[in-house]
Amino acid sequence: MGLAVYLGKRGVRLVLSLIAVSILTFTLLQLAPGNFADLQRVNSGATNFGGVGTESMVGELESRYGADVPVWKQYLIFMKGAVVWDFGPSYKYASRNVQDIIAEAFPVSATLALLAVLLALLIAVPIGVFAALRQNTKTDHATMFAVTLGHALPSYLTAAFMILLFSATLKLLPSGGWNGPEDLILPVLALSLGPAAVLARYVRSSMLETLREEYVTAALAKGGPRRTVIIRHALRNSLIPLVTVAGPLLAALMTGTVFVEALLRIPGLGLYFANAAASRDMPLLMGTAMFFALILMVTNLVVDLIYGLLDPRIRTVGGGSHDGH
Amino acid sequence: MAKRASSVPPAGQTRRDFLRLSGLTMAAIGGSWSLTGCGLFGDDSKAADGQSTLKIDYVPVEVLDPQVITNGMWILSRGISEGLVAQNEKGDGVLPAVASEWKVSDDHLTYTFTLRDNAQWSDGKPVVAQDFERTYKRLFTPAATSAGGTTLGANSYQVSTGIKGGKDFLAGVLTDWSKVGVKANGDHELVLTLSNPNPDFLLALTHPAMLPLPMDLVESKPKDWQNPPNYVSNGPYTVTEWVQNSKLILVPNEKYWDRGNVKIGRIQVNLVEPSAAATATVAYENGETDLVQLAGPDVLRFQKDANLSKELQQTENYSILYLAKLRSQHPAMEDVRVRKALSLALDRKTLAGVQPGQEPGVSLVTSRTGGWDASLGIKEDVAEAKRLLAEAGYPNGQGLPPVRILVGVPDTTLADAMVDSWTKQLGIKASVDHVESGVYTERRWQVQKGNYIGFYYGTFAGLPTWPTMVGSLWSPKNVQEISLPSDQWQKYQAVQEDKNLKPADKTAQLDAILAGHASKPAREIGTLVDKANTAADDAKRMELYKQAAKLREEQYLYLPVLWLSLFHAVKPKVHGLQLRAYPDYFYLKSLSVGS
């Protein structure tokens, strides 16, 4: 019962947040200068060639929104469709519905994000443990310096370096595109380094904390092999807090790979989102923004639930606040 | 603390169970992904054994409808769709395409095309005259009332094409289709009638707007006709796969009437964001693409490299870089002497040296236009420019607000150079106002507040013919609009945006404002172009166009700055490339791939 109530409350909060996101996005879009039709004329063929016509040649946004439909009503029409997962056709990609674009492009971004977080974990855990076990030695400092550097490097810069190294110089990998598994390597590498650095720091500090716990001291005092104690007692428990970091990281990657996708010519959702904003494509921008918000909130919810499962001490009805005991 | 117990997960779901379950779920997700692995990357169809493959780079294609202005229309005219006629190798005349022959009436108003009887759509249906009539009806139907029409964006029809009644039907002024000059007689004869003689008419028919569409399909699948496997074409190639923001896969249209001359088995068109252009040459040098358009810095690098320079191809004098006057509350730029001074003081020769392949753009009409002569060109003169500025009341620029150049494209190199030119030669204050493209589209039509004066920055390209250069690019109407005083311009815009006005009333009111308040020379340009369009002989016509062009230059409302070249890098294995100075750049049909 408690869980149901808790989920219900979170559900209501989620819906309210989505409405807020939609209103905010819509308002900001209305306030932004320029409109879709004018931008199309400037940014596509017309700049290269004389697109001269009569007034009525600039199309009306008619598919759902008649020429004379006031702005607030456009919003309501859009939201009415959004409730049943029908965002209508995109302005820019006029032959496709926004929900079809999301269905096509999200798996691409999600695959990259999952693989990147997975790789990040594979890099971060050994590094974090390694550094923690050698706390305050030169090796520890050197590792953490490298990690901070990795954290500070934005993913698009990493991607650019990798293109230069692996494609331009070594000619080992394609510099971009989306034709086969080999095209996954550069984006996943570029996307994973930052998260790996973040996670490594968490692993290190969490590991240090666990190593000081009495049960670790006790296990060691009982004469258990150091290796076994570290892996079975310390490492397992110190990985729990990682869930709270890895979850949102995953969500952020699934929704925010705009630069890497553009640089490596990957047809993911981030690219659509950026293009929608730049071209004032209302349905596509609204659809993607709300979808991103949904992904973030659902991920956070799942993280909270998993956290509760992994560590019985923090199961509280309060949900997000872990200070209930 | 009692609360805590109540939130324990349902029975049986212990932590270990959960971990096991989530592991299984992940494996299942991974499995389903790997099963649909090819779906993730598209169909991944490879060319059949022994067939050649070509990879070319292009910008993203959002729609494959040639009746809407998008980049998609220029890939269609390269050889996915085929019009009545196609451009010849140089781009200055036409060759038969779907039409095998045509007759022109003595008054140059009626064109009768005979369609070849073996022209077919890729689904095997014949291409008939009705296809063209129905396609053009869709083209001329205003968006707001069309059923399956061009839902969004700007209609791509070029008004200067001059089909009788086309412009009025599109404006909603004319609603009787039988009065529009498009008529199919039987399956193989199409008659197009013009409102005025247009020596460029056949070339104008090579514009994507005039390409035929499979109207049965467009009408039966209004939302889905562009998406493979639905897509049907009538040109040498057809589209089998389209991954948005990634690639377009073309294969020969097996039903094409000239199939024997289509030589490439598979063409992969990489859809590359302009923002990724900086890495485009990496892909080229890494063998991921065989043909790519180059940006300035890469051109320099290619020119200096012994091997790469052989793969560089230039299309000279492709487009023109110009400045257009911004409207402002401040009166300075309303004085033609100020505008003229700014044009005379642009050091075009130095500007041309900033990037490869540029020439001083001394007139709006490009020198490629037949009959062009230097008398049309601006003669730079800094002393005269200073004198004009002083005469206008701004000696040495004193009292003149900073002159701005409004730029909405990412690269401001040339605009910066212009500012430099003015500051050095005239000693005036000037600056580049670099804005996001949405801000640019809105602001360039506004009346600027306070002492904000200057120009917006743009590029244009078009057919190197007089009707296009004078009648269509910076058309008489554009010149009249830009010559309106600020208050009248605001009224004009209000009428344009008035949704309650009937089309005919709107057109009438707008024309009235132009007739009453556009500058006298601007109206005279319109009269000259009208006379030229109906002139009896070619010599007289050119003379009138030249007069109009000269008068337009003297208004200094649009300042020509540079004539720009295009550069492509082409792998040696690509044969038969015929670059033309037209926005589709080349046709696919003539291409083949060797070893």
Image: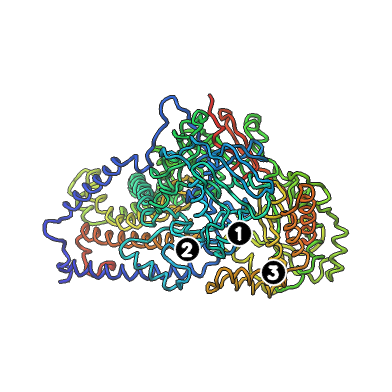
Residue B588 placed where, x, y %?
Answer: 54, 36
Q: Which mark is residue A53?
A: 1
The chain holding disc 2 is: B
Say which residue label 3 marks: B514
* Residue type at numbered disc 1: Gly
Please identify, in this view, whether the residue under mark 2 or under mark 1 is nearer the observer: 2
* Amino acid type, callout 2: Thr
Which residue occupies 61% across, 51% down? B193
Q: Which quadrant is home to the C terminus of chain A? A: bottom left
**Residue tagged by mark 2?**
B145
| Number of other residues with Cα within 10 Å of mark 1, as a class: few under 14, some 14 to 19, many 20 or more | many
The structure residue drawn at horizontal position 43% and vertical position 38%, both measured from the top left corner, is B122
Which of disc 3 and disc 2 is earlier in sequence?
Answer: 2
Q: How is the image coloured?
A: rainbow
Q: State which quadrant residue B589 falls in.
A: top right
Task: Pick whichever, A213 or B35, lies toward us.
Answer: B35
Picture coordinates of residue B373, whole percent (x, y): 81, 47
